[in-house]
Image (tube, rainbow, N blue to C red):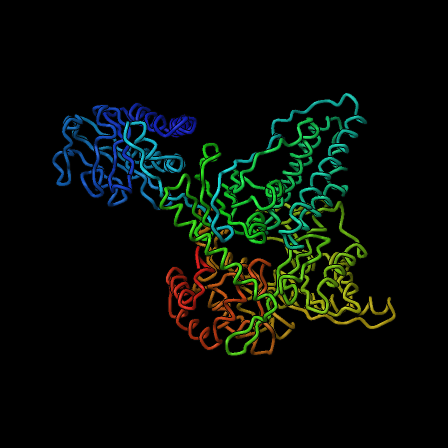
Amino acid sequence: MLETLRKIIEEVNRAPDLTQALTLIVHRVKETMAVDLCSVYLSDYDKNQHVLMATEGLNPDSVGQVRLGFGEGLVGLVGERNEPLNIDDAPQHLRYRYCPGSGEEQYHAFLGVPIVHHRRLLGVLVVQRRNPIPFGETELSFMITIAAQLAGGIAHAEASGGIRGLRQTLGEPSLPENRPLQGLAGAPGVGIGTAVVVYPQADLDVIPDRLPDDPAQEEAAFYDAVDAVKKDIRKLSARLEKVLPAEDLALFDAYLMLLDSGTLGNKVIEHIRAGNWVQGALRDTINEHVRTFKEMDDPYLSERSDDIRDLGLRILAYLQENPRTQTRYPQRSVLVAEEITATMLADVPAGQLAGIVSTRGSRSSHIAILCRAMGVPAVMGAKNLPVSRVDGREMIVDGYTGRVYISPSDEVRTEFTRLLQEDTELAADLSHLHELPAETTDGVRIPLYINSGLIADITPSRNSGAEGIGLYRTEFPFLVAEHFPGEKQQRQIYRTVLKSFAPLPVTLRTLDVGGDKSLPYFPIEEDNPFLGWRGIRITLDHPEIFLVQLRAMLHANHTLGNLRLLLPMISSVSEIDESLQLIRRAHQELSEELGEHLEKPQIGVMVEIPAAVYQADALAQRVDFLSIGSNDLTQYLLAVDRNNSRVADLFDSLHPAVLRALLQVVEHGHRFGKEVSVCGEMAGDPAAAVLLLGMGMDSLSMTVSGLPRIKWVIRSFSKQEAVALLNEVLAMDDVHLIRQHLTHALEQAGLGGLIRAGK
């Protein structure tokens, strides 16, 4: 039965459209189960009806004509209950509804199962027999299994027409399709434009192994291709220079660093000399690096695999003498792809990018982060989007709700045009906040910092009005090197970062690598890297690595004095004690070597796992500040992988458990006179910012693009109002009610435009 099921699913997935897929389903299910009838009804939410869309056993003329209202007949009963219905004599059932001319009067045994996708009823799959013999457990299990397997395919097909497309096939007039396709909100805003589908023009996966005719010539061809890609990257960087903040623009510098470093090049040459031609050598090298990054737990780092693959494809295109052809971009372009890379964004001429829609990724995807920095609406994880069928069609992107409208009606277009205009006006209103402090209406000031990317030579911009860097990740130089970076190299990087914001504070997080962020030269394989050897655990086990980094940070801070040192993944006080001992040792050794006293930085702990929450009082007595990593803390508390589209909607930092955990950390930190801050995405959420203000957070750190919005929130509430709102929310035990309550509060304060389209 399992093998039969696989074959059915494979055949259905190969069907060119929904009509043929449904026809194939009823034929194969009827044949496999040896029944007399099989039918598929799809749910038409426009008319609140279940419509017969395919059948073997009923009168073929009934297709499209038999319509049962929601809750009407046995099919309606299956949909109403959302569970299977197995009866031996259908005509005798109280809910039986006879449809004249269908020929169903000859059938008695009835088995119907709902087709459900993400809690939404898509339709009902029915089989029947002439004899009044109920179906067995094996048959019921098969039906449930096949309905569950088919749900995703039907949902995907519905996105490209669904009921509407079948109406056209059946000769009915086409109705406006205003039901949106649901994805994940990636970057706020409204985008209206023409869909431009983009895709890689070279394919590493189809490159075969082949002996090189002339290894030296192969090596020369590789370096020529790399030089060509470097020129392209520099052009793309120049194109975005005026629309991206410095820390995000430096991503392209990181690409150049990857191409300049020996990491990629030496590996390719190594594979060539081992007996593979340049294209095969490139394939193996890129795949090795992609695999390394994909295994990382940190979403930011994991998604660097897309950037590396993109670079590999661009090199391959030149090796194949097929440089990227010029795509025509309409004045208002909505970029659509299965995976969108930073260079794809940069390919769009300045001022012509209206939005992006990606079938993969989440709000934490780097592309989503870039879009937020650029002010471009983005919908991620729209996995049911029929990418191959939308090129050239008008599309509306609602980055607030994660919805996409394909070929919208006049009414929908008019409404979103109005909302887009109001969004534009709102952005202009926020610009005047640049020079103003983040201060409540009753005079409480909350410093706002930025989280910088993982770029080695970052030069953060102070044009954003940020008062410092709340989190700087130091992993990137380690990931792109062939060996652990030396003390001098690290010192130069940290000095650049510290100097760019001096005298304002810059928080450098110590190395956070391990089983989930395996380095090419320090591979680690673990069964569960999420809970493995990582962060402070690995640096304490390797003090020779930790001390080099600490010395580099302390030396870089000399004469500047704005370093704050942050320790990641702390789960016990013993880890703090060992870390502090090593920091003191590095400080003493370096002071003796330089012959002068070095400034001692403030030292903090990242509170990102539940163990740290429950030991916050002990931690606060040992360090200078506590920094809450809301992303990981929420993920660990709720056991939700926020990059898994199946459960991403369960990830919400406003969950009561998360709020109580944060409040506990603040209380313990303040009890011992220590600062407490939030440096995750929660800090950039307008709804959450009010609660963080009410909790008494001492500072917030976020992306550059989120800073003016949070500043507006803080300047719109008094501390007393925020505390009152926090107390109201703490009495609630449902995250949806909490978000609704906060949304209402923001609307009442005139801040509705921060959380939805329009002012």
Residue 477 vertical placement versus 498 (above, below)? above
Residue 243 vertical placement versus 36 (above, below)? below
Which is nearer the eye, 49 or 153? 49
Of the 4 image quadrants, the one containing the N terminus is top left
> Residue 197 placed where, x, y %?
52, 35
Residue 52 quadrant: top left
> Residue 716 placed where, x, y %?
48, 71
Which is nearer the eye, 377 or 88? 377
Which is nearer the eye, 724 or 752? 752
Of the 4 image quadrants, the one containing the C terminus is bottom left
The mark tally for this picture is 0
Which is nearer the eye, 367 or 25? 367
Is residue 151 rendered to the left or right of residue 429?
left
State whether residue 608 appears in this view.
no
Residue 140 quadrant: top left
State whether residue 261 appears in this view.
yes
The residue at 25%/45% (across/down) is 81
> Residue 97 placed where, x, y %?
15, 36
Residue 391 vertical placement versus 741 (above, below)? above
Residue 497 quadrant: bottom right
> Residue 581 placed where, x, y %?
73, 68
